[in-house]
Amino acid sequence: MSSSTPLALLNGSYLSSRPTGIGVVARELGNALDPKLVRLLDPLGGDRQGSVPIPKNLSPDDGRKGHLRRLIWTQRCLPNLLRTSGAQLLLSPLPESPLFKGVRSVVIAHDLLPLRQPQLSPLLAYHLAYVPLVLHRAVKVLCNSDATAREVHARLGVPIRKLVTIPLGFNASQLSPMNIKREPFFLVLGRHDPHKNLSLVLRAIALLPDKEFKLIFAGPHDRRYTPKLIKLADELGVAKRCTWIPWVSDYKKNYLLNTCQALVIPSLWEGFGLPALEAMACNTPVLSSMAGALPEVISDAGILFNPKDYKALADAMQQITIDGLLRGDLVQKGRLRLMAYSWERSARLVEKILTSLQR
């Protein structure tokens, strides 16, 4: 490999102007990886050293059409880009890679939620057939948590020797304490998918004796699920206390995390739980479900509750608003917990793995 030839290409086709979840992981890893070692396939026209422009209409911003275009582009165009660049490996921030062109891929597995809770949709075959095939054909599968690694092995039979846990990170330049007044609301970040269990938060807030407290839901709406949640809020008598924001900028997210009473993560399952780190970075307490990888990520730096018990969440919400000593203890533990997580650390681990696969 010459000095100008990258070892790997980072598939940035999922990147968009309004990233969430996997898009954030792709963006932050792309920024932290050594550009001489890993060259970014960039749909956004950024100024990253050595980046390669690719079509802009492949991301979730373009809906299912974008998803389909990305899958076709992955099979038809990615192999040619690898061959032209001389790169030995494809690094993908999600389980997508060419299947029939002899491509050596390293992919990141975030969770297997579509297999845990399968739904009839045009994407069902993608989750049931394509994703497992990609994971089996990859030379390495990077899992964002031990919980995800265990599930990928147990549910899909991917050999343990292929699995490596690579914890995610947080962006300290975008997320930090602002030392401003906390306001009477709880924050929920993320999509409105069923596994996010957002109805639990609505039922919990309805139990709080102090009706001043509100909820802000910041995350992409879904026409299948969002109307049902809004209807439930109305039935519970909390509709006027709920704000639904489809997307927030990094600055707005930092502001919300710095002004809320706590971040609430009620999920029935999470492969990691990136918002928990983001909250800790803002000295914000985390009230979290004890499902999936969340206890692994949060440890004792948050209040964990049963995701099927809305009364337990209501108790935690009440407790965090009246117990200053508890709040201070969780903030301190959160700062300590953050020392184990950074995108730079994640990038160095990924680079070490890629280098070990060099021919």
Image (cartoon, rainbow, N blue to C red):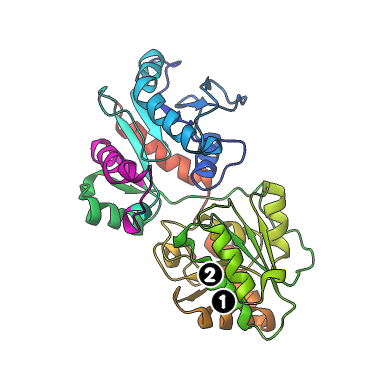
Disc 2 is placed on an element classified as helix
Identify which residue, 17 or 38, lies in the foreground: 17
Identify which residue, 14 or 141, lies in the foreground: 14
For the point 24% across and 55% down, which residue is it? 155
For the point 56% across and 37% down, which residue is it? 61
Tag on residue 199? 2
Q: Is residue 302 visible?
A: no
Identify which residue, 226 or 27, lies in the foreground: 226
Residue 217 drawn at (x, y percent): 63, 61
Give the image quarter of residue 99.
Answer: top left
The reply to whether the magenta stretch includes residue 121 is yes
Residue 294 drawn at (x, y percent): 45, 64
263 is higher (above) or lower (below) than 315: above
Q: Which residues are magenta?
A: 115-142
Give the image quarter of residue 292.
Answer: bottom left
For the point 61% across and 41% down, which residue is it? 18
User: Dot 1, crowdedness within 10 Å: few (<14), some or many (≥20)?
Assistant: many
> In the current view of this chain or complex, which residue is farthest to the bottom?
209
Disc 1 is placed on an element classified as helix
Tag on residue 239? none
The reply to whether the magenta stretch includes residue 307 is no
Q: Is residue 337 visible?
A: yes
Disc 1 to disc 2: CB gap under 8 Å: yes
* Residue, disc 1: 203
